[in-house]
Image: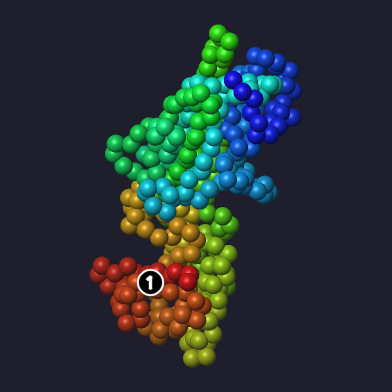
Amino acid sequence: MSSWAGGELPFSRCGESETRILSAACAFLLLAGFHAPAAFAQSGAVALKPIGGDITAPALPGVEVFDFTMPPSPTPAGTEPLNFDVACVLLPSQTVVPNCAITITWLARNGSGGHVHNTNRPPGRFKTQNNVIGGWTNPQTPSPPPVVMDNSGATGLLGLTYNSPEASGVTEFTGRGVAVVNGQTVFFGPNTFTIGVQIEDLALASGAGLAVDPRSDMHDNNNGNASQNMVGTLGTMAQSFANTLTQQGQPVPTVRVTALSLPLGGIFDFKVQWRPPHATHRLGNDADIGMCELTARQRTALSSAISAAALSTPYRNESPAEDVCGPGGTRHWHLLLR
């Protein structure tokens, strides 16, 4: 066994009952810097921090503070990793215990990220340096269960990677360990931590001349969030639209926004759980605008306002010349922030 030389552990955060425990005390650690929970189980503690820097969410009034944050995966393969080194460590000596059997379990918190449906919800995927894999980032069959069990080996350090799901929300994961120390079985943990899978800084959209409908199947009233840039750009578009029609002596209808993004971004599943056809609307930079209440002249004015506001309509059939309200039509235009 060897002492961990990565810096002093923040034992002051472990609570008085923990610091009184001497050689029998132990901790299950995710190393490379440390993050300690507020509460502990048994005689062990968990401290953790991802490799590559602290990305802990800031403490904002009225907002849950996660132990870590990361963006959702843009593809089913899960390409946004969070990397850890994992070890079992005795306290207070900070001795790394080799050959510790480590178990990680995790789940996606029900109802998080604006999703009120939870059947077969992807919890993300953990993978150890020895290629032990559990969990999944998008629905697939069969899916390995959200648990990985591996051994820290002779060094006492086990590399671990987490790939986020496409669906934003909260991932809760728990670490446990067991090892033989001086002929005695010692248990480490368990302790649970949270990963906030999210797109940062989305907010409810509103503005003069806009009517945002936050309702969505499978998401209650959680559809209506956008980036700050998108919110401002939609306001610019609505003002330009109103100015054009006013100059023409025409009535100015409210621009109806029927789809934006979920509170934490990520996949905005529609009709089918955790999958497209609603393939976009993940980053807060997309909006659907209702068309069927607008006249041909109003659609032309809106098209000009969209271009002037640096928005694009990426689908060719969504223009004043096309009837999106006929049979099989989308009944809306899709806007994208350039």
The residue at the point 49 percent across, 91 percent down is 248
Front one among 13 and 109: 13
**Of the pair 331 and 153, the residue shown nearer to us:** 153
Amino acid type shown at disc 1:
Pro
Q: Visible in this render: residue 107?
A: no
Q: Is residue 306 above or below residue 113?
A: below
* Camera sees residue 171: yes
| Vertical relation: 29 (above or below) 114 | above
Question: On the image, numbered disc 1 is attached to which residue?
Answer: 314
Quarter holding residue 30? top right
| Total count of labels | 1
Using the image, determine if residue 277 lies above or below residue 151: below
Residue 44 is left or right of residue 137, and the answer is right
Location of the N terminus (image quadrant) = top right
Left or right of 8: which side holds 277? left
Q: Residue at x 31, y 42 (%)?
A: 140
Quarter of the image holding residue 304? bottom left
Circle 1 — which element?
loop
Q: Residue furthest left?
A: 327
Type of colouring? rainbow
Q: Position of residue 211 (x, y in %)?
A: 51, 68
